Amino acid sequence: MKDKAGIERRTFLTGAGALAAAGLGAKVWSDHNERAQRADVFVARAGSYDDDLERVVTDGLRALGLGPDWIKGRSVLLKPNLVEPNRTAPHINTHPAVVRAAAGVFRRWGAGGVVVAEGQGHCRDTEFVLEQSGLGRVLGEERVEFVDLNHDEVYSVPNTLRFTRLKRLSLPVALRRADIIVSMPKMKTHHWAGVTLSMKNLFGVMPGVVYGWPKNVLHHAGIPQSILDINAAVRPHLAIVDGIVAMEGDGPIMGVPRKAGLLVLGTNPPAVDATCTRLMGLDPWRIEYLAAASGRLGPIAEPHIRQRGESIASLAQKFQVLNV
Amino acid sequence: MSGDNVTEAARDELLALQGRDGGWAYRIGSAPSTEPTALAGLALLALRPDGGPEAAAARSAADWLATVQRRDGSVGVSASVPEPGWATPYALLLWTATESHEARRRDAARWLLACKGRTLSREDDPNRVAGHDTTIVGWPWVADTHSWLEPTATAVLALGRSGFAGHARVQEGLRLVRDREVDSGGWNYGNKAVFGRGLRAQPGPTGLALLALAGTGPRTDAVDRAVRYLRSVLPDTRASASLGWGLLGLRAWGETPEGSRDWVAEALMAASGRPDAAVKLTHLLLCGAPGALDLFGRGGGTRTVDSGRGDSR
């Protein structure tokens, strides 16, 4: 896609364009200083969904300084990314094996309860999405409860960040009941937002009964702006990104699979998303919501992110983005 | 358990899940909401239109719906979520089916006729990012947003059932439904293509679209494509809303796939006892109930139930 300045999206998102950022909001938005902010992000190799992912998640959490003491007795809500039902395109949704692994770790560490929750935007029938994605079967096997965030009861909070014009945000009560909220996205390019990772994944906590299918209210309010407002309101505690088989091109639905062979974990969503963006061969400063999150919700500059596990250079690939 | 026994057990479970106030909730322990209440009422009426505990429960549901109608005629999601008003058609359908709350029906229909989805002119989308005709006015989920398939189909059904089948808004709504068919056949939430790439159909919206189109014109190639799509996907679908709307849409065009009673029985047994059983049982009971098509104005008749009640407004 071409922006108003006529530069192609790939050129813009990688920062290779001569006009990069000029005329767009990124520079204006990144007026907050993140120099005092630091975050840890763990990058792990994971070649297949058949790997011992519970071990990978355990290692990642320990590398981030998190252990049983953090989890014990606390209720955990896992929020995967289940955009749309499709048996034939497993790269659309967070793979059930990753969700199973995370639930396994938290249970083993004595969580007070683990639920999986989603409010997908492209299909009203959550049961159908669970059926098609294979997650329903896994949750049944593991006896993990699922909460449909689209049809949960809601509560309202003031929109403190106000990147959108929305004065208040309606959220499902399941979020309020959880002590720990874990965003578990699929690593994908996105034809509007550039990338969809742990922060964009939170569109899926916004209840459909209030925002519709798709969540058109948020589209009209601005996608990057909505990402920021929602993250400021929800403040997820942890992100676990499924980048084992990711998506490139026309994401979040019609893109093609890209074997990236990694999981990324961290407690600061902007830092996690910035790291993933670099792993996709893109420049996080060119992603509007990330540039605006810098200094407000967390750091995105490489020197401010303490990299644990694998280096970015060892696993980075050049993801294709939509150019039309 | 035989299919009939499964249906009877599901009906009994659905009746038992009704709240004292007459409403049903999306999930046990939650407050009642408009959509599950109206659909449960319709399902019970469709099972036994001539009276009995089913009709009494439906009338009680209709009364509860009256408590959540706003002054402007819209019906909110629930008592505590008065906006948006996308659930209004469901309430209107049940009030019409029970022949109750006449003034409320008038207000709801008036609100629906005034409710319009936001359009985009062709100049607003010079690169033709959207694959559909963004100038057609249908119904949105939320005020001041674009029109989508499901709220448009339900508004078409409810208004058609209320005597507005020939209204220009309903006719334009039907045009929107036809326009949003995806290239491979069938419908999804209302996006046929983005950036020139066709999107995929889903059984629930496809069934709902077929239901909305039934009786409004001859059987078209689009209907045939949707029927083929549903016949291919439903045998492996046990998700209740998708299976329920899919089968009801097929029924509206005289199609009943072999084995579908077994699929429904299987899904009913899986839904029983779950925290969200009410909505699941409702969809599954509705799709096979004898009077269901009539209640949506798609059965060739106009059967209603005499509630014996006047209007409360």
Image (tube, rainbow, N blue to C red):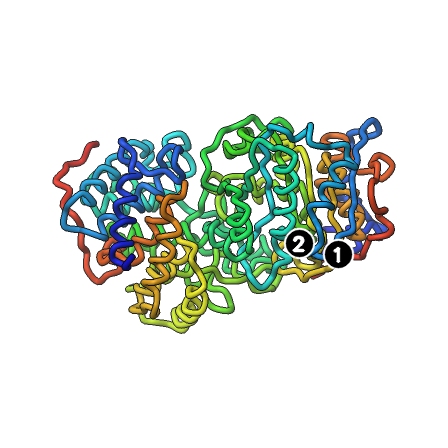
Extreme residue toward the left, this view: B308
Say left or right for B55 vs B216.
left
* A135 over B19 or under it: above or below: below
How many discs appear? 2
Residue for point 78% across, 31% down: A31
Find residue A5 and name its label: none
Q: Position of residue B110 (x, y in %)?
A: 30, 42
The answer to whether tags 1 and 2 share a subunit is yes
Q: Is residue B190 visible?
A: yes
Residue for point 63% across, 54% down: A252
Q: Position of residue B137 (x, y in %)?
A: 43, 53
Quadrant housing residue A273: top right
Say left or right for A17 vs A124.
right
Name the amino acid type tagged 2: His
Determine which residue is flagged by label 2.
Answer: A191
Tell me the CA gap for discs 1 and 2: 26 Å
- In this view, the residue in front, B69 or A106, is A106
- In this view, the residue in front, A130 or B262, is B262
**Secondary structure found at label 1:** loop
- Judge the density around disc 2: few (<14), some (14-19), many (≥20) Cα neighbours within 10 Å: many
Q: Position of residue B165 (x, y in %)?
A: 28, 56
Name the amino acid type tagged 1: Gly
Q: Chain of mark 2?
A: A
| Mark nearer the N terminus (1 vs 2) | 1
Quadrant housing residue B123: bottom right
| Quarter of the rendering occupied by the N terminus of chain A | bottom right
* A30 over A252 or under it: above or below: above
Find residue A47 and name its label: 1
**Secondary structure found at label 2:** loop
